[in-house]
Amino acid sequence: MEPLMIAQVRRFNRTVAQRIGALDDAYLARGRPLGQARLLWEIGEDGADVRSLRARLALDSGYLSRLLRALEADGLIEVEAGGSDGRVRTVRLTAAGRTERAGLDRSSDELAAAILAPLAPAQRTRLVGAMAEVERLLAASRLEIRVTDPGDPAARHCLQAYAAELAGRLDGGFDPRLARPVDDADITAPAGLLLVAGLDGEPVGCGALKFRREGTGWAEVKRVWISPAVRGLGLGRRLLGALESRAAAEGLRTLRLDTNRALTEAIGLYRAAGYREVPAFNDEPYAHHWFEKHLDGTPGADG
């Protein structure tokens, strides 16, 4: 990483921390530090379970417990066991907590207005646009990609969302029973693998490999899905790159995949990532295009 880039990020962090008052003991003059104020906002009107709060805010469990105790002592929240699982605790705002959260919202609006007010209209537009871009890039930097068992709840969520999206987008819908099978065993070691992407503890994408050891060996890319909430953050390319790295680590130098003509974004992604269209290599009934990429850089069948 370039030292100048590191230095710029640090300067940006210092400027933002100072400008928003993150260093103050009483954030937004509300009598409590930023950590407590942020937690009140995140709990929200409907409440939240402690586990999801810890994941969304990326907080150490001990620090989160101290924040919750402080808010509970001030009468702003209630913490109770949730559902049938006593290990899951739910946090809800009290009436006083809802009043405090509303005050934080008003003060946050006032701070945002104070940041924008000294600027000319064109500068405000530039700043807000730059903030939106920074927000998107920071979100992209928080994406995590991990090998996941297909039976894991996060994996099931992604695979079900994949099937549901195909059912809504493909001409005539999508029935997994009619497609070439991809069983859990096919995408579990040693036969293959499944990658799941997460953002702040929530599953937002997946991609799988089926290893084909016959001949010189290759891998088939399957079940690539990106949540609409994170499209445009480059996750598709990152997932493809991670799948390629995993295939290379297995000694496989060629990746192949098929896709439907309705999935224009996917087709564009594959072409931009260096995949070349090739003749059909399977009898997938939902496929109209077949692609191949050689990881050693040699051209594909039409190259």
Image (tube, grey):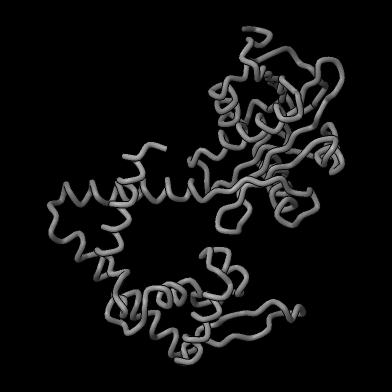
- Tell me where residue 92 appears, x and y as whole percent: 55, 82
- Tell me where residue 115 appears, x and y as whole percent: 21, 62
Residue 57, compared with residue 13, is above or below; it is below
Q: Residue 125 vs residue 61: left or right? A: left
The quadrant of the rendering that contains the N terminus is top left
Label tally? 0
Residue 298, compared with residue 53, is above or below; it is above
Q: Nearer the viewer, residue 36 or 63?
A: 63
- Tell me where residue 288 appears, x and y as whole percent: 70, 22
- Tell me where residue 83 appears, x and y as whole percent: 72, 79
Residue 94, compared with residue 57, is above or below; it is below
Which quarter of the picture shows residue 78?
A: bottom right
At a point 71% along the width and 23% down the height, the residue shown is 255
The quadrant of the rendering that contains the C terminus is top right
At a point 72% along the width and 20% down the height, the residue shown is 253
At a point 56% along the width and 75% down the height, the residue shown is 62
Which quarter of the picture shows residue 18?
A: bottom left
Q: Nearer the viewer, residue 218 or 261?
A: 218
